[in-house]
Image: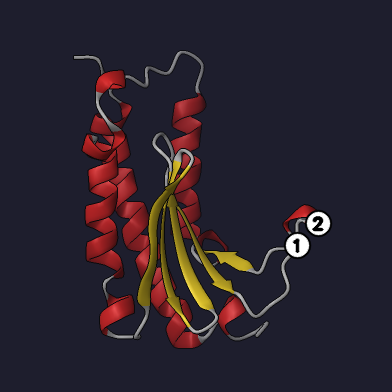
Amino acid sequence: MSLKNIPLTKSLAFNTHLEQVDLGFDFLISEFGYELSKSEFKGREFWIVYSKEAIAIEIVFEVGGLPFVTIRNNNLPQDEDAYFDTGDSIEEFSPKAQQLKNSRYERREKPGANLADDYALYGREEHIAYLKEAARTVRENIELRRGVLGMRA
């Protein structure tokens, strides 16, 4: 069977993502009182959002890339058209997360790169490592009230 015929919800990448978000971000609910406010597809992206008061932790995943994890303060003004965003990407606070994304994109963008087995060979481990680092960084930012959680609130 062709990979194109496998529904996204049955794919290794999607199921790895759900499993790792459950494992890594459960502290938001159990320790910090956040609620799971969104778990849905928006086009080709799968969004998981944890919310508490004005703060949202957004975890966006699209097959073929690493997730985007953002801490957003919804009390701050936002204007996407003017590129004014009230969210902090965890990569702003984590050189390790940035390095994981950079190395993934560099490997995948090389001329002649064979991406057929990329997720099985490298991508799954990068995906897991990225989400673990993202969860660690989110926890640290909440505890220290960094970024939109404190300095600009």
Residue 125 shown left or right of residue 140 in the figure: left
Residue 26 shown left or right of residue 151 in the figure: left
Q: What residue is shown at x 39% (from left), y 77% (from top)? A: 139
**Disc 1 packing (10 Å; few <14; some 14–19; many ≥20):** few
**Vertical relation: 95 (above or below) 105:** below
Q: What residue is shown at x 25% (from left), y 56% (from top)? A: 20
Q: What residue is shown at x 73% (from left), y 73% (from top)? A: 77
Tell me whether circle 1 and circle 2 mark residues in contact (CB < 8 Å). yes
Can you identify the residue that label 1 sits on? Answer: 79
Calculate the distance from the C-alpha at mark 1 to the C-alpha at mark 2: 5 Å
What percent of the width, then of the height, locates residue 34?
A: 37, 80
Q: Is residue 28 visible?
A: yes
Can you identify the residue that label 2 sits on? Answer: 82
Looking at the rendered structure, which numbered label has been put on residue 10?
none
What percent of the width, then of the height, locates residue 18?
A: 26, 53
Q: Nearer the viewer, residue 92 or 149?
A: 149
Which residue ends up furthest to the right in the rendered image?
Answer: 82
Q: Secondary structure at mark 2?
A: helix
Identify the image quadrant of residue 21: bottom left
What percent of the width, then of the height, locates residue 68?
A: 48, 53
What percent of the width, then of the height, locates residue 32?
A: 35, 85
Q: Is residue 67 visible?
A: no
Quarter in which the C terminus is drawn:
bottom right
